[in-house]
Amino acid sequence: MSLFLFLSFVALLSALGVVLTKNPVHSVLFLILTFFTLSGHYLLLNAQFLAAVNIIVYAGAIMVLFLFVIMFLNLNEATEPQKPLLAKVAATIAGGMLLLVLVAALRGVQPAGYNAATFNSQVGMVDKLGLVLFQQYQLPFELASILLLAAMVGSVMLGKRETGERNF
């Protein structure tokens, strides 16, 4: 229980750091810390595969891409335009309304308790996930792979244009 509370505390603080930090590089680093704490939560839930995928894919590949783009664009406070007061007020009102909707939607939720008689400790294991993925969800899995293949071919076609040629 104490590890859960520690991970939750660090996750909330790092998520606030993502939103409140003015430096975009620091914001990405806080987001990486948030992903690591979420992976810790996955490990506590006995979902080792999700924890590994979260670290490899999100904290690894996607955050490196974000960091590269931020450094490539050279974003800083001097180049960012000042937002008008009306935009700040509208964003605050929209955030408050979102919080109100979330509280209203989750108001009547009763969390389920732990039942030792029906608990299955093998739920998050890789072999069980693979069986479900390739038996029950084989068609959506294959359709997603075809969609990703088409996206890769399209990005290669857009990236390999000759000088003076227009693709679209």
Image (cartoon, helix red, strand yellow):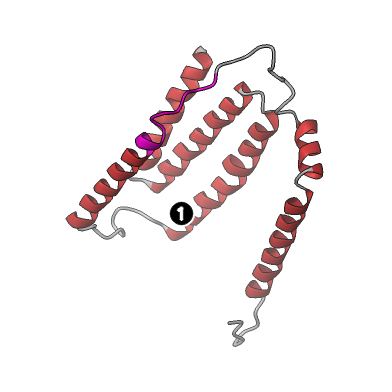
In this view, 138 is above or below 46: below
The residue that appears at 75% across and 46% down in the rendered structure is 137
In this view, 105 is above or below 149: above
Q: For the residue carrying disc 1, how many other residues have a C-alpha within 10 Å: few (<14), some (14-19), or many (20+)?
A: some
Residue 45 location, quadrant: top right
The residue that appears at 71% across and 68% down in the rendered structure is 153
Give the quadrant of the C terminus: bottom right
Where residue 107 appears, as percent x and y from the top left, is 38, 30
Residue 147 lies left or right of residue 98; in this view the side is: right
Give the residues in magenta: 102-112
Residue 1 lies left or right of residue 100; in this view the side is: right
Where residue 62 appears, as percent x and y from the top left, is 58, 48
Between 115 and 25, the residue placed more toward the observer is: 115
In this view, 86 is above or below 160: above
Between 147 and 138, the residue placed more toward the observer is: 138
Q: Amino acid at mark 1?
A: Ile
In what element is the residue under mark 1? Answer: helix
Question: Is 38 one of the magenta-colored residues?
Answer: no
Where residue 167 appears, as percent x and y from the top left, is 61, 82
Residue underneath mark 1: 70
In this view, 10 is above or below 21: above
Where residue 50 appears, as percent x and y from the top left, is 65, 34
Between 123 and 159, the residue placed more toward the observer is: 123
- State the count of labels: 1
Residue sticking out furthest to the left: 85
The residue that appears at 77% across and 53% down in the rendered structure is 139
The residue that appears at 36% across and 45% down in the rendered structure is 23
Q: Main secondary structure of the magenta part?
A: loop
